[in-house]
Amino acid sequence: MNKNLKIISFIFSFLFLLIISSLIYFWVFKSTYYAEHALNKRSFNERFKFTRGRILDREGNVLAYSEENGQKRIYPYGEALFHPIGYADIKYGMSGIENEMDEYLREPRGFISGIKSFFGYEDTKGSDIKLTINSELQRYAYEIIGDNRGAIVVMNPKTGEIYALVSKPSFDPNNLNDIWEEIMSNEDAPLYNRAINGKYPPGSTFKVLTSSLAIESIDNILNRRFKDQGFIDFSDSSRLYNQNGKAFGELSLKDAFIKSSNVVFGNLALELGNNELKNYAERFYFNRNLNLMGLSVSKSYFPKLNENEIGLIAQTGIGQGPILITPINLALISSTIANDGIMMKPYIVSEVSNSYGNIINKNVKNILSKPIKRNTSSIISSYMRGVVESNLSHISEFSNIKACGKTGTADYKDGDGDGIPHSLFIGFAPYDDPKVSISVIVEGGGEGRGIASEISSKVMKKSIELIG
């Protein structure tokens, strides 16, 4: 009997200690997190003690503001700007810039506000957030993608400013209460920001990196002649084919790039090896955190493969197999090529200013890294110009802006079968003085030389008209 009592006593003592430890953990380590969490209604009521600050585009147009004594947010551009801006709602919480920049938006900031608060006088308005987004371009890009699922990212390659960040499908955040259940049940995931969180096979757009590494690693590569018989045979009797099984014969590296030879780039991946290709991809921010003030970006992925996985190694050289990339990372790659091999840090928040108009936080252009030699980027730029001139001459907008680009047709599995390939394009313009770079992905859009290229041409041309 005494033994049983000891066991019961031990169990109750253990449970008591467990409960106390949990309470201490939440009080000490998690109390701030839950107090400030977007779904904490008490915290939300505290936030609305002040009028929430505005969100503005690069021209000063208002993208989000508060009315009804600060209790309701209004989004004049509706669904076109939902994904970068997000929403702030007392019932449904917050997302996007509304969430990531909440500490500035929700309450007064700056020296004058601090002095007034010290003497018991509270300012009534939070800080304003000014973005690098051009709202007219954003709306244009959103409309031109039509009813397709996908993403568009437009950047300034020389500064890192993001001019447009489009994800589709979307929804109008002005009417959350009426549409929330529909949003949550929608299989197309309209809450999902494809531009910064969507991860896709890059397809032939990745040949930009494979060819760059080959130029920097393999002696006399620019003078080599490659033989393309339409496929690569592997030891397990499997094959890697060119698109539509076409054989290109004898090719230079430039020819292989323009014709997008899977055979040449699959063999180059095998010659370079997985370690070298993975390390080079990581210089372009695969497998690394890309910090973007105001938004949370997912990591692109490049795999570590065994030497005997030759089929998969060849696949990565053409942007297929296990490799995955976000649209914003694709835009960063095209920007780096356009900017003489210098990768600028991307940013979407331009500045934060208080209710007195004083700037209390400002982003300026910063170099993120220099992943590629200037001469290499110049060679790849000329190759990308060749792609547009040789393969996309039917798109008049490209000619008008002297565009450079690389198309991609990305295969993927849809359940047990093959899905309709994604259509991709990365590029920049003009060739001799790049002012804008872009990445476009259209889910299930087919060949990259189709819809993704057509969208890119129109959006880049519009960008140069509006901003360049």
Image (cartoon, rainbow, N blue to C red):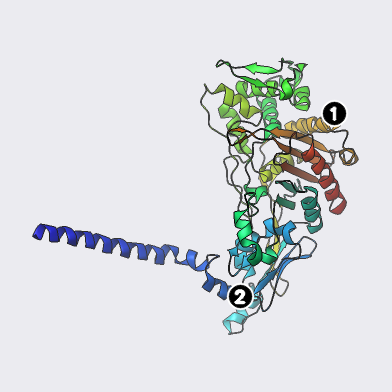
The crowd level at tag 1 (other Cα within 10 Å; few <14, some 14-19, many 20+) is: few
Amino acid under disc 1: Ser
Where is mark 2, residue-wise? 48
> Does 344 sit above or below residue 34?
above
Image-quadrant location for residue 13: bottom left
Please provide percent x and percent y for residue 140: 81, 53
Image-quadrant location for residue 283: top right
For numbered disc 1, what is the local secondary structure? helix
Q: Is residue 217 left or right of residue 158?
A: left
User: Is the N terminus in the top left, top right, bottom left or bottom right quadrant?
Assistant: bottom left
> Does 430 sit above or below residue 319?
below
Please provide percent x and percent y for residue 302: 58, 35
Q: Mark on residue 78?
A: none
For marks 2 and 1 on the same chain, the one whose residue lies earlier in the sequence: 2
Image-quadrant location for residue 322: top right
| Residue furthest bottom in the image | 120
> Does 177 sit above or below residue 216?
below
Q: Is residue 146 left or right of residue 5?
A: right
Point 65% across, 35% down: residue: 419
> Does 451 sit above or below residue 64?
above
C-alpha span from label 2 to label 1: 57 Å
Q: Which of these two is toward me, 448 or 117? A: 448
Q: Is residue 29 visible?
A: yes
Please provide percent x and percent y for residue 86: 66, 60
The crowd level at tag 2 (other Cα within 10 Å; few <14, some 14-19, many 20+) is: many
For numbered disc 2, what is the local secondary structure? loop
Assess whether mark 1 and mark 2 are in contact (beta carbons under 8 angstroms): no
Q: Is residue 210 left or right of residue 236?
A: right
Q: Is residue 53 visible?
A: no
Q: Is residue 204 left or right of residue 464?
A: left
Amino acid under disc 2: Phe
Where is mark 1, residue-wise? 390
